Structure formats: structure tokens, C-alpha cells
């Protein structure tokens, strides 16, 4: 099976469509790691597009919970809370119900892979450093755990009790071969709002036959997404940061 891995789309339909166009024909089933909505201007379009993919698994993110009323968003900063409130007002009843029914991670995909939004031990926890990664690797139920939430593509792995970590290369793709004697905790990065200084949309392709995970970046029409945000009356800072990848 070849899986398309999407995470942290944040209602950015332009980034999502660019990813889907580039990946067309290269995958069999989709997996979504949460935060379909939040920050961006097209929550319904993104949800509709994701639903049309008929993913094998979709888990909820913290912005999904806030937008559909499962969380009050009090832990968000002011801008994020404004965006969550705006998103909640835009959602169709069907899409609000869809977000409310999303699974809570972690969710196993097969004997090798599981997915979560924040961490295997807490769906809202941010995995940033080695200490966080160790805890995540110790609590994961599968050899490969894919996570999102931080907007930062990163790879952690443990081989012979030694933890290592790295960011993907700056090119179009980074290939990781999933080895039998290694445990992995990997964030493919954000489709709709990267924060690693690279404005390109991030996603991944996982082939469970060749055991290759490809972490990919694709340029998209950032200025179009910015115009949508400004046209919706959302804070200008949400548009500006897209061009910075921050």
C-alpha cells in the first residue's frame, strides 16, 4: 500500500490542491494527522476535499476541536482564537459534525505504523526536542509513529538504544528507509502553514512494500492563499506568515 500523508492543512486549499496535484497517481490511500482547519480561509473546501479522498484514517487536531466546539480554545493565543471563532461561524452543519466525529489519536494503521496529532501519550502535546521524542518513542505502539502539531518536519529514531534526530534536507524530497531494528517518530511537516522557514507545503508518501517514507516539499500559490485570508477579514498576520514559513 502507498499512503499519502497529510498534516496540519489549516484551511489552506491552495496548498492542499498543490500537494494533491503533485502526488496524483503516486498513492493508494490517504492518512490525515489532524488540524484540517484553523488560520486559513477555506475550512469547508478543505474538509470537503479531504472527505472526497476517502482516507483510511483521519484524526483530530486541537484546531479541529476548537472549531467544532469540542474545546473552548482558551489555551490559544489571541490570533489563533480569533481564527477558531471565525472558522466555527463558517462551517456547514455537516462539516462541523464531521470534525466532531474525528478519531482521537493515536490510531494504528497496520502492524508497523501508527498516527497521532501531538504525541502518542497526549494528542495536544508538542514534540520539539529529544526529551519529548524519547517519551513519544517509549509510548508508541508501533515501530513508526507519524505525528504533526508543531508545523515542523523532523525525524527522530532509536537504534541500539541510541536516539538520533534530524530535519529533512532543503531539497524537494528526503527519503527514509524504515528498518526492522529501528523505531521512528516522524513529523512530515505542515501542508498549510509550515513554520520551519520554508514556505513550501510539506507532505509525505509512505510505501509499506519498499518501506520507504518520502518527505516532500512543493511550492504553491502563497499569494492566492494570502488574498483569501485578507478577503475573509482574518488578521493580516496570518497571511503574512505564509510567505515567511513562520
Image (tube, grey):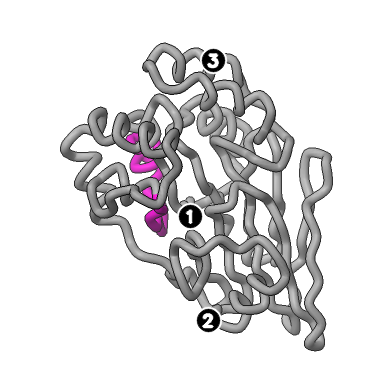
Identify the residue shown where x is 25% and y is 45%: 68
Within 10 Å of the Cα at label 1, are there few (<14), some (14-19), or many (20+) other Cα atoms?
many
Q: CA distance from mark 1 to mark 2?
A: 16 Å
x and y percentages locating residue 238 in the rendered image: 52, 27
Q: Reading the chain from its start, which is encountered first: label 1 or label 2?
A: 1
Asked if residue 49 is among those painted magenta in the image, a careful observer would answer: yes
Disc 3/disc 2 C-alpha distance (Å): 40 Å
**Residue 48 image point, x, y percent:** 33, 35
Nearer the observer, 210 or 117? 117
State yes or no: discs 3 and 2 in contact (Cβ < 8 Å): no
Q: CA distance from mark 3 to mark 1?
A: 24 Å
Badge 3 is on which residue? 224
SS class of the residue under badge 1? loop
Tell me, for residue 33, which label it has, or none: 1
Crowding near the residue tagged with mark 3, few <14, some 14–19, many ≥20 C-alpha atoms within 10 Å? some
Tell me what residue is drawn at x 41 percent, y 66 percent.
105
Could you say which disc has been placed on residue 177 in the image?
none
Quadrant containing the N terminus is bottom right
Q: Which mark is residue 141?
A: 2
Residue 191: x, y in percent?
57, 39
* Residue 242 magenta: no
Amino acid at each position: 500500500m502507498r499512503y499519502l500523508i497529510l498534516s496540519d492543512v489549516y484551511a489552506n486549499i491552495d496548498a492542499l490542491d498543490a500537494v494533491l496535484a503533485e502526488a496524483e497517481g503516486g498513492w493508494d490511500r490517504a492518512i490525515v494527522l489532524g488540524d484540517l482547519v484553523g488560520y486559513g480561509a477555506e475550512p469547508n473546501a478543505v474538509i470537503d476535499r479531504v472527505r472526497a479522498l476517502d482516507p483510511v484514517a483521519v484524526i483530530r487536531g486541537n484546531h479541529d476541536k476548537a472549531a467544532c466546539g469540542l474545546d473552548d480554545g482558551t489555551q490559544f493565543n489571541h490570533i489563533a482564537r480569533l481564527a477558531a471563532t471565525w472558522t466555527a461561524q463558517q462551517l456547514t452543519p455537516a462539516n462541523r459534525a464531521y470534525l466532531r466525529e474525528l478519531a482521537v489519536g493515536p490510531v494504528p494503521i497496520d502492524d508497523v505504523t501508527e498516527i497521532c496529532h501531538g504525541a502518542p501519550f497526549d494528542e495536544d502535546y508538542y514534540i520539539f526536542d529529544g526529551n519529548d521524542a524519547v517519551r513519544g518513542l517509549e509510548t508508541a505502539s508501533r515501530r513508526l509513529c507519524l505525528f504533526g502539531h508543531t508545523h515542523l518536519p523532523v525525524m527522530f529514531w532509536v537504534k541500539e538504544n541510541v536516539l538520533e534526530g534530524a530535519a529533512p534536507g532543503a531539497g524537494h524530497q528526503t527519503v527514509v528507509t524504515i528498518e526492522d531494528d529501528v523505531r521512528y517518530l516522524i513529523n512530515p511537516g505542515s501542508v498549510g502553514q509550515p513554520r520551519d522557514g520554508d514556505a513550501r507545503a510539506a507532505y509525505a508518501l509512505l510505501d509499506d512494500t519498499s518501506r520507504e517514507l518520502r518527505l516532500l516539499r512543493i511550492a504553491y500559490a502563497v499569494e492566492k492563499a494570502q488574498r483569501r485570508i485578507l478577503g475573509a477579514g482574518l488578521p493580516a498576520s496570518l497571511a503574512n506568515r505564509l510567505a515567511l514559513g513562520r
